[in-house]
Amino acid sequence: MLLVVVAGGSTDGLLLLVAAGGSIRGVPVEADGSIGGKWDRGQICVSEEAQPPLRILPSALAETQGDLPFVAIVRSRQELSRWLSNPLPGLRWLQVEGMLEDPEAWRDAAHNDSNIPFDVVLSDPASEFSDLYRVVDAYAVRAIRVTMPAAPGLTKAIRLAAALRLPVRVLPGQPSAEALEELHNALEFYLHEPSVEAPVEFFHSVLATMSDADADSLWMILEEDPDAFRYYDADGETKVRRTDDFGRPEIAPAGFVDNHLRSLIAQGAECTTCPWQRPCRGYFKWPDPAYSCEGVKQLFFSIQTAGDEIRRDVASFTATDTGILSEPGEVQR
Amino acid sequence: MSERVFSVILLPTSDCNVACDYCFEHKEPHRLSLVMLPLLTRRLLDHIEKEHIEECEIYWQGGEVMIMGPAWFEKAGEIMDRAAAERGRRFVHYLQTNLIGYSPAWNGVIRGMFNGSLGTSMDYPNIHRKLFKGGAAAYTELWSRRIREVKAAGIEVGVIAVLHEGSLEVGPEKFYRYFTEELGLSAFQVNTPFPGGPAKEVAGGFQLDSSELAEFMVGLFDIWMAEGYSLGVSVGPFDALIDNFTGKQARLPCIWKENCSNQFISVDAKGTVAQCDCWVTSYPEYFFGNMFREPDLTGMLKTSRARRDFVERPKHLVEDEDCLSCRYLSICHGGCPVRTYSALGTMMAKDPYCEVYKAVFACAEAHAGEILRARAAPIVSLRQRHEVGVNSTG
């Protein structure tokens, strides 16, 4: 069975077409050693057994992880250099923050033996988008993904990332009206610009969901499900993304997404009747359950429309393909 | 080991045996000695070893490389290839020559070191490439004879043509037929001209009108697609663009790389390192350093302030020019730094041929669309047959 799987998509030992730079249950994908966001084939087996969450920690805390799977967050050239020169066995990738302005760091990353993947985080796409050119040399020697918030400058950053064939993860959070406009523009670009080759998440995986591929919810796609991705602050305290308010006793990482959705439904939130409940699972109702999803529903609708078009095209192609295999008369008989 | 390839445009001499109008090189008599070659080789091998690169492409050009003589190349190839093999690396050599100095004495080294092929240059019509005695007509006659001789010797030839006002006047059809029919070539490449040499000292006649140049390029593209593409004729850079737009892995020319500084360097006979041959022969303000004086090429490339401008250029272009909104950004990135610098005196601007490139890209995209539709046509045709079959038997 051939299946198109995208970043964050779930897999169960099937033959895959994998978008390198994406992740499968928290494990960055490098099928057949491919890098550079290129499409490639590979046989990836994912255990059905429950896996411990992937820990995402500040560099200093990561030192204690050893063989346990973890992601180190680096914020300085020294931290970057430390993990490139002597990575621990459990290191899955480096989350590189606030370093795009440092050309020296990127020169080091380009001239280094290690091929550890990077997740490069842009905190302000409007001012940082052009710095993406600095990662080009490093991208030639390692897989790199770019992560950015839905914020002004998002479309610019996605345009440039696409031109450089860099996979992107957009963290929409609870987007403001301004951010929603950026998301709509970015989605339009992703869906209709032929030069886009690398995945732009969450559009890519949601589109796959709507094209009948089996995929997870936004929480998994965006690596925010605490059951699979456990974030730690500098004090070693675990956090659910997008809020510092974790003194609340009702918020526990285990089973967080299910509990959150149940709570929303119990409160009669619009999720109850929302057609996008499966891919969303209350993502946009966190941390503020009163957030109006009107704008994000339009996003889902646009992706659904594109998914429908793809499904029609695939059906049409399949019918044509059948025609190739048999003579017309034979088909009729 | 990385699959990356590092390329070096190596100029063993800047000296030349002809007198072309548009040459931007200082024709110094300096030549790379076989005494210095082992040091140059060691520096290159140190660099690719540090970069975990297995293969280094050496593009030998000048000046005019054949001035060095076949015996020199035979020895040079031996020195370099032996040193590379000892370190588990490999050099792949390419030869770019004006062919004026060619004789059958070269055949052995061309077949051995250069794998039986070479690149040369000719324009159509030729009005700017000249011999010291006899001018352009004599050049054309001698070069044409040399082409016949190398082809008769079984050597594969690729030709680069630089466009000029005369090319635009004769038009793309005559231009195409000259290379494919009169010369009988199955591969040639067209380059846009630029006024090399000190910035802004523009040599007249080499700044072509963009709309006229675009019209010519598109016309040439159309003729190639109609007459040569399906027969296997290769016209660069059109063939790479067709590959790109039909979803194949495309090797686009250096002028359209996202960052040419990570692809190659040029080194002259004195060990000067710069971005490409245009820079190393024309613009000392953009030299990266000297390979004979500095022991660490990797360190030089990493720290050179001049090189930093190349690395930072595309960033400036997407901020200050309209490149970010261009649908062809992924295959252009603002174009060629040296074309920009030679025309404008700064590289922090987009290539002056922007409009020409856009026209060519659009043309390539349209042709690629036709190719893809044609590939799908048999499927559609079968489907129609199927539908007819269903209807007629129903």
Image (spheres, coloured by chain):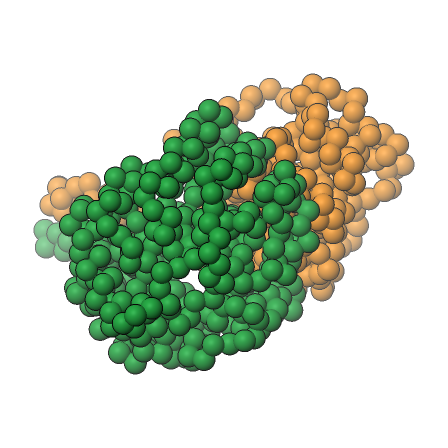
Chain colours: A orange, B green
Where is residue A158 shown, x and y percent of the image? 60, 56
Foreground residue among B318 and A274: B318
Report the number of discs.
0
Residue A196 pos. (x, y %): 50, 54
The residue lying at 29 percent from left, 55 percent from top is B101
Please identify the quarter of the rendering in which residue B17 is found. Answer: bottom left
Please determine whether, in this image, residue B130 is positioned above or below residue A67: below
Q: Is residue A3 in sight in this rendering?
A: no
Give residue B382's position: percent from left, percent from top.
18, 51
Look at the picture and state if A57 lies above or below B152: above
- Residue at 51 percent across and 55 percent down: it is B276
In the image, is B23 to the left or to the right of B101? right
Please say if B167 is above or below A321.
below
Name the residue located 79 percent from the left edge and 40 percent from the top edge.
A76
Percent of width and height locating residue A192? 48, 60
In this rendered view, identify the residue nearer to me: B352 or B369: B352
